[in-house]
Image (cartoon, rainbow, N blue to C red):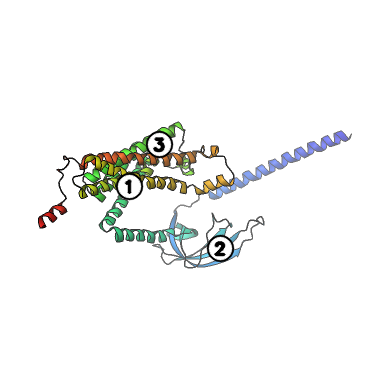
Amino acid sequence: MRFFLRLGETRLKKRSGIIALLIMTLLALECTAVLAQEYADYPPDGMEPQFLKARVLSVEKVISDYAVPDDFAVESEVIKLELTSAPYKGVVVQSTSLKSGHPAYDFDVEPNDRVIVWAEILDGNIVEAHVFSPDRGHYLKWLVVGFMGVLLLVGGLTGIKTILTLGVTGLAIVWILLPVLLRGYDPIYVTILVSSAITVITLGIVGGFNKKTLTAMIGTTVGVIIAGLIAMIVGSAAHLTGFGTEEATMLFYIPQEVQFDFDRLLFSGMIIGALGAVMDVAMSIASSMEEVMLARPRITQEQLLRSGLRVGRDVMGTMSNTLILAYAGGSIPLLLLFLAYETPIVQIVNFDHIATEIVKALAGSIGLIAAIPITALVGSRLFKTARPGSAKKPASLQRQKEVI
């Protein structure tokens, strides 16, 4: 008898559980339908989200009454803002901001702080406004001004040329390279063409179109090609996917629906990453060889080659560190996680992101090192086109001789 009672009780519990599950499912579907109906027409016709600049007038902190765990503090702030972006300059709005207590998602604002506001605008009127982030651009602007001031103060005319070349490089990447890649063109070919154009324009503006610049151009081109080839060969052999970052994965969902070749996109990034360092080394060697040639017009081709190689070796020691430290610096939080959890080294080097950074750093360094003998060899040939002893003296030395 007890057996049948327990059996009936068990079946009743099962049926009750099934009924409860069905009720919860129906309620969830009903809530989903209500929310879908509520937000089906959101944003309303004519609603236009915009990012506006604003100044904080006042901040009022209010303890939230939301039901949360004891160890998860939630605080709300009522922020009064004065917009500073046209055509809403001078308009005062109010924003309510929830703070979770996590530094990655919260930031503190004080009166007179500059912030960026995400505003919902309907028919020219601000319906709702939320603080999006601090106005970092305001401070970055002054940093750029200081950078240009230092360039002009120390470099003079060369500083002006440097600013011009930086502008050309930035425009080439933002207005040419990225839009062309976004249209689905081959990343490798596009990157090589843009890199070549950047090299020619940058070195031409800085050094003028002469033997020194031609030497640096050849050395840079060969070094970058070597770096790119090594990156492609090693990356393919190591099965690097190009998905080492979240941003690469997000490219699957962009509205343009471009089918990217992520392997080639990864290698094009490696080429761009190595371009600046290789260009720096090639120009340094070419400039030093030109100075040696001007100081000692009768120097032999072999002596000039050795001089360029010595300069290149000195530059090599620091520039290789620059590349490796630059890539390592961006991965410090990840490396700390590995250290904190005592991750085995065999596991670390086989992560796609870490292996990609290693290939970037070492392939770029190999291209940089390869550019040294190439630049020195080309420079020794170009600067010593005449037979030893018959080199034309610099104009300044010739004028001094005539005065004497």
Query: Which is nearer the eye, 380 or 252?
Result: 380
Circle 2 sits in a helix, a strand or a loop, which is it? strand
Mark 1 touching mark 2, by CB under 8 A? Answer: no
Mark 1 = which residue?
280
Sort mark 2 into few (<14), some (14-19) or many (20+) by Cα contacts within 10 Å.
Answer: some
Identity of the residue drawn at 27% across and 54% down: 161
Mark 1 touching mark 3, by CB under 8 A? Answer: no
Identity of the residue drawn at 20% across and 48% down: 296
Q: Percent position (x, y) of residue 22?
A: 69, 40
Q: Percent position (x, y) of residue 393?
A: 15, 48
Cα distance in 3D space between marks 1 and 3: 20 Å
Cα distance in 3D space between marks 3 and 2: 50 Å
Callout 3 amino acid: Ala
- The quarter of the picture where the C terminus appears is bottom left
Image mark for residue 231: 3
Q: Is residue 9 above or below residue 125?
A: above
- The quarter of the picture where the N terminus appears is top right
